[in-house]
Image: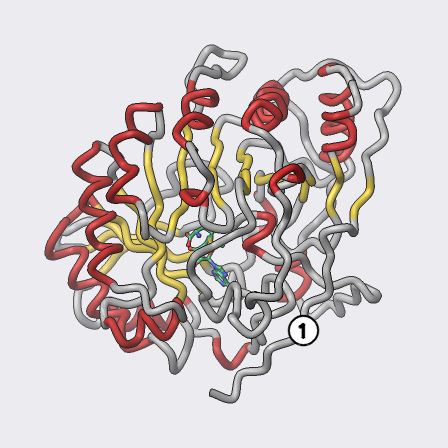
């Protein structure tokens, strides 16, 4: 296949325990980073394991039978996750996305959903709790997740053609089972369902129009297909700019068949640009972090499986909250530590890369996406 797979340097130990700043004001929900960006969205990776080996995310050559995943006692417990999430909510987070790895591999995930769903923002508003999944066990889990308080799901699916999809997930997983998961989610009331398709030039680009046709014709506005540019996350997926098919090109191919027009964002800091079919058959989205960086209003923090806080998807270093969580630190001090990290945040990796600024990371590699959560 000619793909270059880079051996993994284990970055999971590369982190600092954040200091607890003196004189930190109590959370006001108005926390802003060094570039004035608020904190609104928390992505929580609940497991670093996945049952797929997508070449662009967890290539089999690296994540093989010899790869050591985190031991169970390293993972944050549901109680620890809920405690940290509550502090983030006090700082302004109103949306939580559970991810991974494959989040539905974490046993009894619906229990965590239930614990998070009783939380309220300081204004008394329920949180927007969502989940990103490869859909492999969604058909079995959809009802319980909905009953526990999950609002919506995003399902990843890169092709409708079984041969292409199975080559991309690299474990021979069939398309039909993912489609069954999408149907089950809709039936359970977890819609509209977003479907994420990572587009790789020369790999699944011929699936763009068939995917659009399938979802618009069968579901209309109940499913929103989003095209994601292949990103240079992590250090193992052999990313090359030549493999990126820009969102502009994807949109052109769709527009040639079904004309589309732009829509306003639903909320500031949204990752996907929204477009609608002019014939009223629903909406599609484009996530263009390579060709159109959206760092300027990025309001997302990521909590890794074992409690490291990452302030950018492309970071190489996390801030380890677990020693504080397990070391008797009070909520007040933990909230202050989180505020200290966020208020110093100046990350804008994709913008700098897009502007051609050299991004030397010393000998540190970017952390893997399955570990900090997509
Ligand atoms: N296992 C879950 C899933 O498959 O949706 C959640 C984790 S996965 C890391 C989250 C999302 O990241 C998926 O939609 C996946 O396709 C996307 N993703 C992973 N690596 C990527 C890359 N290099 N470029 C673009 N998207 C990527």
Q: Quadrant of residue 65?
A: bottom right
Residue 173: x, y in percent? 31, 64
| Horizontal relation, residue 200 to residue 262: left or right | right
Which residue extends farthest bottom? 2
Q: How is the image coloured?
A: secondary structure
What residue appears at the point 15 percent right and 49 percent down from the top-left corner? 220
Q: Quadrant of residue 176?
A: bottom left
Residue 4 visible in this rendered orientation of the protein: yes
Residue 213: x, y in percent? 16, 63
Q: How many marks?
A: 1
What residue appears at the point 38 percent right and 82 percent down from the top-left corner? 202
- Frontmost residue, 88 versus 264: 88
Residue 118: x, y in percent? 44, 15
Q: Is mark 1 within 8 Å of ligand 1?
A: no
Q: Disc 1 designates what residue?
A: 7
What residue appears at the point 70 percent right and 41 percent down from the top-left corner? 35
- Frontmost residue, 374 versus 76: 76
| Horizontal relation, residue 226 to residue 344: left or right | left
Mark 1 lies on a secondary structure that is: loop
| Horizontal relation, residue 367 to residue 179: left or right | right
Residue 262 visible in this rendered orientation of the protein: no
Crowding at dot 1, Cα within 10 Å, few <14 / some 14-19 / many 20+, comes out as few
**Image height of 83 relative to 179, above or below:** above
- Frontmost residue, 327 versus 200: 327
**Image height of 103 relative to 248, above or below:** above
Residue 328: x, y in percent? 78, 18
Q: Quadrant of residue 337?
A: top right
What residue appears at the point 47 percent right and 23 percent down from the top-left corner? 116
**Image height of 16 relative to 245, above or below:** above
């Amino acid at each position: 296949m000619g793909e270059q797979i880079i051996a993994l340097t284990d970055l999971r130990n590369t982190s600092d325990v954040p200091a607890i700043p003196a004189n930190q004001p109590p959370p006001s929900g108005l926390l802003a980073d060094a570039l004035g960006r608020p904190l609104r969205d928390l992505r929580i990776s609940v497991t670093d394991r996945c049952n797929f080996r997508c070449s662009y995310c967890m290539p089999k050559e690296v994540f093989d039978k010899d790869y050591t995943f985190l031991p169970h006692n390293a993972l944050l417990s549901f109680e620890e996750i809920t405690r940290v999430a509550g502090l983030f909510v006090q700082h302004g987070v109103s949306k939580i996305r559970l991810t991974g790895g494959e989040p539905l591999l974490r046993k009894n995930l619906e229990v965590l959903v239930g614990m998070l769903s009783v939380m309220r923002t300081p204004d008394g508003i329920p949180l927007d709790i969502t989940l990103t999944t490869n859909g492999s066990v969604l058909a079995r889990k959809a009802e319980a997740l909905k009953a526990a308080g999950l609002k919506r799901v995003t399902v990843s699916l890169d092709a409708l053609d079984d041969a292409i999809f199975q080559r991309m997930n690299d474990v021979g997983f069939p398309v039909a089972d993912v489609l069954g998961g999408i149907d089950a989610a809709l039936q359970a009331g977890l819609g509209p369902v977003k479907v994420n398709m990572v587009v790789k030039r020369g790999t699944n680009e011929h699936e763009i129009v068939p995917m659009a046709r399938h979802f618009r014709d069968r579901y209309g506005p109940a499913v929103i297909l989003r095209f994601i540019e292949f990103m240079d996350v992590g250090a193992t997926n052999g990313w090359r700019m030549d493999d990126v098919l820009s969102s502009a090109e994807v949109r052109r191919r769709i527009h040639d068949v079904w004309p589309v027009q732009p829509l306003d964002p639903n909320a500031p800091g949204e990752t996907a640009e929204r477009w609608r079919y002019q014939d009223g058959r629903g909406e599609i989205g484009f996530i263009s972090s390579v060709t159109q960086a959206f760092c300027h209003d990025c309001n997302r923090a990521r909590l890794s499986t074992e409690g490291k806080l990452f302030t950018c998807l492309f970071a190489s270093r996390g801030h380890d909250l677990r020693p504080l969580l397990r070391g008797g630190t009070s909520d007040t001090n933990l909230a202050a530590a989180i505020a200290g990290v966020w208020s110093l945040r100046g990350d804008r990796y994709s913008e700098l890369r897009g502007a051609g600024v050299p991004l030397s990371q010393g000998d540190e590699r970017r952390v893997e996406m399955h570990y900090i959560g997509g």
